Image (cartoon, grey):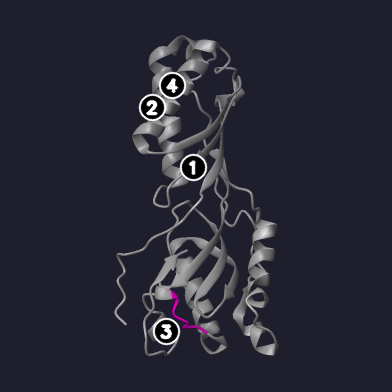
Amino acid sequence: MTPHFTGLDAAYQLHFYLCFKTHYLRPMLATKEVNSMVRGTLDAVCLREQYHLLETEVTQDHLRLLVSLKPKQTVSRAVKMLKGNIDQQFRVTFQHLLESNNSRTLWARGYFARSSGQVNLKRARAYVDTQVSHHGYKGERTKALKYRNPTFKSPAFAFDHSFCMLDYHLVLATQNRIALFDEAVAQSLFDYVIAIGEKHNFAVDRIGLLPDHVHLVRGDAQCECRTVRARNFGKHASLDYKALFRSA
């Protein structure tokens, strides 16, 4: 089988709650004029960058957003574009508010970010843990088809000026849903996925292995939804094939 590594398709739902606060919590967002500028800038940036802005709340010292991103878009860049453009417009239009609040910038350093959705981390873990039995596999051999990271915690990474809780449930299916995996290759595959995580800054919490697909729960340092491709699974697991995973 020849893998085609450029042909990945994905179904995704990546919603994030973002929160920014003003410098020293000064009430610089309190007026209707500032509120209007903030919302207008948000709309313009989201249109240009192809972010999907779902909800917006502006208070006198906080901006809270619910935004939907594509897999190749990162939380860090989205924050940079949103905070940076609003701050720039604020400097141009409301310089007097910076002066009256004795501040050189609108925003405090850093931000809060959290993945958001109908399924939380606890439910995602429970779902992954039951997938092997759900598909009818029972007995002692099924223990080898599950991986749990006893040291995993959310947030998986710590930063000086940001607090990010970015957790994901991924489902990866083999090309043409060919049954490739069993308990004989499970540990090698788990080791390989963990090694990918260490290289690309995501932590693996759970893995559930089925013959033609894999469930993973992971936490990221950044939100760039890198797909775990099986480019070298064949070699790593001492098999005579290479498999391409696609997000399903």
Where is residue 143? Give x, y as percent. 66, 83
Q: How many marks?
A: 4
Where is residue 140? Give x, y as percent. 69, 89
Amino acid type indicated by mark 3: His
Label 1: which residue?
68
Instruction: Report the Cα–Cα distance between label 4 and label 1.
Output: 18 Å
Tell me if label 4 and label 3 are in contact, CB under 8 Å: no
Residue name at image x 42 percent, y 24 percent: 41
The 10 Å Cα crowd at callout 2, few under 14, some 14 to 19, many 20 or more, is some
Label 2: which residue?
44
Residue name at image x 44 percent, y 28 percent: 42
Q: Secondary structure at mark 1?
A: strand
Q: Is residue 10 above or below residue 102?
A: below
Residue name at image x 39 percent, y 78 percent: 243
Q: Is residue 80 above or below residue 215?
A: above
* Residue 228 visible in the picture: no
Lower position in the chain sequence, tag 3 or tag 1: 1
Tell me if label 3 and label 1 are in contact, CB under 8 Å: no
Q: Secondary structure at mark 2?
A: helix
Magenta stretch: give its range. Answer: 177-181
Amino acid type indicated by mark 2: Ala
Tell me if residue 43 is in the magenta stretch: no
Lower position in the chain sequence, tag 4 or tag 1: 4
Amino acid type indicated by mark 1: Ser
Q: Secondary structure at mark 3?
A: helix
